[in-house]
Amino acid sequence: MPFWTIVYALLFYAATALLIGGLAYKIRKYATTPAPLKIPTTPAPVTRQGVVLRMFREVAFFESLFRSNKWIWLFGYLFHFGLFLVLARHLRYFTYPVWTWVELIQPFGKYAAFAMVAGLAGLWARRVLVDRVRYISALSDHLMLALLMAIALTGLSMDYLTHTDIVSLKAFFLGLMYFNWHPLPEDPLLMVHLGLVATLMIIFPVSKLLHAPGVFFSPTRNQVDNPREQRHLAPWAAELEK
Amino acid sequence: MADFDIPELKEYPVIPTIHEGVMAHSKPFVAKDEFQKQLGFPGELIDNWQQVAIDKMGELTGKYRSLAVFLDACVKCGACTDKCHYYLGTSDPKNMPVARQDLYRKVYRRYYTFAGKYFPKLVGATDLTKEVLDDWYSYFHQCSQCRRCSVFCPYGIDTAEISMAAREVMDCVGVGQKYCNEIIGKVYKIGNNLGLPEAALADTLEGLEEDIEDDTGVKVRLPLDEKGAEVLVVTPSADFFAEPHVDGLMGYAKVFHEAGISWTLSSYASEAANFGMFIGSYENMRKVSLRIREAALDLGVKRIIFGECGHAWRVAYSFLNTLAGPFDFLDPKYPVPQHIMEFTYDLIQRKAITLDKSANDDMVLTYHDSCNVARASRMGPMPGGQFILPREVIKASCNHFYDMPQDTIHDATYCCGGGGGLLTDDLMEIRVKGALPRMEALKYVVETYGVTHMAAICAICKSQFTKVLPYYGFKMDSIVSVHQLVSNAIVLGKKQ
C-alpha cells in the first residue's frame, strides 16, 4: 500500500474512534448527571409529547435563536442546513449501492456548500464587526470557523475547479469500512480536505461542537412542566432525606 | 441624588457599545463570620481556597446536569449579548450573559477539560487567581437570576444556574454575600427575612384588621397560627408592613373573607421568599422550605397558598414538592402549592366575589411580569397561565389597563433590576442601571396611554420600584400590588 494511503487510513480509523468514543463518553455523562430541580424555561410543555415537539422546533428551526437575533439565525441556519445537505450528499461515498434518498438530494447537496460558505462568512463577519461578539470570541472560536471554511472551500474546489478521482476515493472509503484497503488518490486538494475533516472529527468531543448533543440534554428545554403533579427527586437529594 | 450617572431614557431602546470594566467596582458587602457560620460556611477566605473552590466546581458539575451541559455547549454565537438588563443599563461587557458565564467557564475549562488543560490560551481558559475570584464576586452579584438570557439562547443556557453555582463556590471558600446570608440566618432564627418575631407579627396583623374595619366598616380577619384553618397562607414578610405590599396582604384577607374560607398565617413559616436559591445552596433552600411543611402539618391545614412574590413562587411552584414533599397530607383536590392569583381568579370566574371596577378609576394601569413568575413557573393548568391570570384579575378590578411593548412582557419581560439577592442598598448603582429597560417600556405606555400605575406580584419588584422609580422621574407610589387593586374593588358583605 502507498505510504499516504496507510497514513490516511490510520488517521480516519483514529478520528472515527475518537469521535464516537468521545461523544459516547460525553453523552453518557450528560445522561447520567442528575438534574435535581425542575428548571424548564416557561412557558413549557406540560406533557412529554409537548417536550418532543419543543425540542424538534428548537433543533429543526432554531426557534429560540429566531426570536433572539434574525442575523445570527439566518447565517446559522444557512450554515447548518447547508452542512446537513452536504453531509447527506457525502453518504454516496460510503454506501454501495447509493441509497435512493441520497440520489434524490444530490442536486441540492451540491449547491448547499455555497449556503454553508455564505453562512460561515456571515457568522465570521459578526465575530469581527460586532463589538459584543468580538469581545466574547476566543482564538478557538475563530479557528473553528477557519477550519469549517477551509473544509467547505476545498470541497467546493474539487467540485467546480479541479475534479478528483471520485471512483478511487469511494473505493478507499468502502475499503476502510470493510477492511479491504484500496489506495487513496493522491490529489493534494483532496488530501487537505480529508485531513481537515479528520481534524474536525477529533476535536468534536473536546470543543464547543458539543452543543450538538448538548442541546438534547438541556434541562431548560427538555423538562416537562409538571412539578406540582409529579415529585421530582434526584438520587443525591433523596440521600438528604434519610 | 446619586453618586453615579443615571442612564437616560431613550425613545427607542438602544444596544450600547461595550465599555470594559465600568462596573468592576460594584460589590456587595461581604458576609461576616457569624452570618457565614449559621449557614454552614467558613467565616472568611480560607487558606487553601483555590483547591477547595476547584474541587467544589467539580462536585457541582457532577450534581447538576444544567451545569455539565451549559459549560460545554455555548458556541459564543452572541444571541444573548443584548438580552441582559444589566448590560443594557451599564454597557459593561461582563454583564453580557455569555461573558458572565465565561468568568466561571474559563476556570472550569482550565481544570476540567482537555482543551483547557493543554491549550489554555487557545480556548481562553485561566487559572483561578484572586483577581478572578474578585471578578466573580463583583459580576456574579450583578445577575438577578431572571433567566431572560435562557429564553433567547438556542440551547437554553441559563446564566442563573452559573451564577448560583459561582455563589455556592464562593460561600464554600468563605466569601459570602452579607445581604443574602444574613437574611437566611434570620429565617432560621425567627422565621422570616425581616426578623419580625411572633409578637410583633400578631400586633401588626391586629393593626391591619383595625385599618380595614376603619376603612370599610367590615370586620375582616388576618389570623395567625390558627390550628384547623383550611388554608395556610405563606407570603413574603415585606407584605406585613412595606408599601405597597401591605395593601396586597389586606387584599388577600378580604378575598378570603368574601370567599368564606378559613385561613391562617404561620409565625414559624412567616416567609415565602427562599434566599437559599439565590446562593445556589440546595441544602439551605431545602431547610427553609421544610419550615413550610412543618407549619402546614402543625396547623393541620388542607391547602397551602402563596402570596405575591416572584422568586418565592419559583421555589414554591417548581421546587417545593421536590424539597419538602410529598404533600399527601393535604387535600388532593388542589395543586400544592397554589398561588393567591389562582385562588382569586377562580373566585372571579365562579362569580363568588364581586368587584367594583370603578373603585380603581383614579388609575390607568400596566402590569410588570415578574421574571421568575414569567420564566420559571406557571399558574393555572395551561402553559402561559402565569401571564393570563394576573392580567385577568387586574382587568376584573379596574377599567383602564394597557400592556407595555410586546418585547418587554410575558417571557421576554425585563427584571426589575433588584432580584436574585441584589435588593440591598450597597448595590444601588447596579439596581438603578438595571431597571433601565423596564423604565423605558414604562415611559412608553405612560406617554402613549397615560398610564399612571404599574402593578406587580413580587415583593422584590415592589420594593425595588419604590426605590428606583424616582431616579427616572416617576413617582415612588406608582407601583401597586395586584391584590391592592382587588382590595380596592372588592365589595364586602355581599355574601353574608
Image: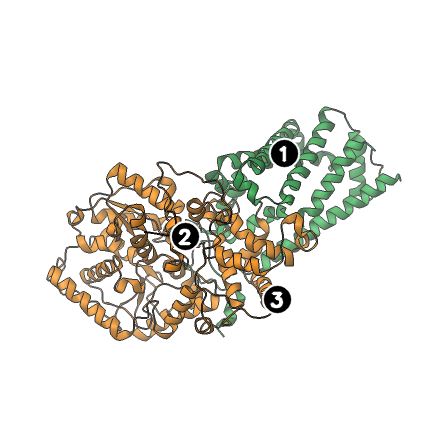
Chain colours: A green, B orange
Q: Is residue B226 visible?
A: no
User: In the displayed image of the protein, which residue is found farthest to the right?
Assistant: A1
**Label 3 lies in what chain?**
B
**Depth order, front residue of A93/B201:** B201
Q: Nearer the viewer, mark 3 or mark 1?
A: 3
In this view, which residue lies farthest toward the left?
B217
Q: In screen coordinates, is B175 left or right of B450?
A: right
Earlier-in-chain disc, 2 versus 3: 3
Percent coordinates x, y for residue B322 in the rendering: 44, 64
**Amino acid residing under circle 3:** Gln
Q: Chain of mark 2?
A: B
In which image quadrant can residue B447 be found?
top left
Please tell me how crowded label 1 is: few (under 14), some (14-19), or many (20+) other residues with Cα within 10 Å.
Answer: many
The amino acid on which the numbered mark 2 sits, given as a three-letter code, is Ile
As measured in the structure, the alpha-carbon distance from the residue carrying label 2 to the one carrying label 3 is 31 Å
Q: Can I make out residue B466 in this image?
A: yes
Q: Is residue B42 left or right of residue B337?
A: right
**What crowding class fits label 2: few (fewer than 14 Cα within 10 Å), some (14-19), or many (20 or more)?**
many
Give the numbered dot on residue B51.
Answer: 3
Q: Secondary structure at mark 1?
A: helix
Label 2 vs label 3, nearer the camera = 2
Q: Are marks 2 and 3 in contact (CB under 8 Å)?
A: no
Query: Does dot 2 land on a helix, a strand or a loop?
Result: helix
Quarter holding residue B483: bottom left
Compared to residue B364, the image places residue B62 above or below, namely below
Look at discs 1 and 2 and give the one toward the viewer: 2
Badge 1 sits on which subunit? A
Identify the residue under disc 2: B430
Which label was assigned to residue A85? 1
Q: Is residue B182 above or below residue B313?
A: below
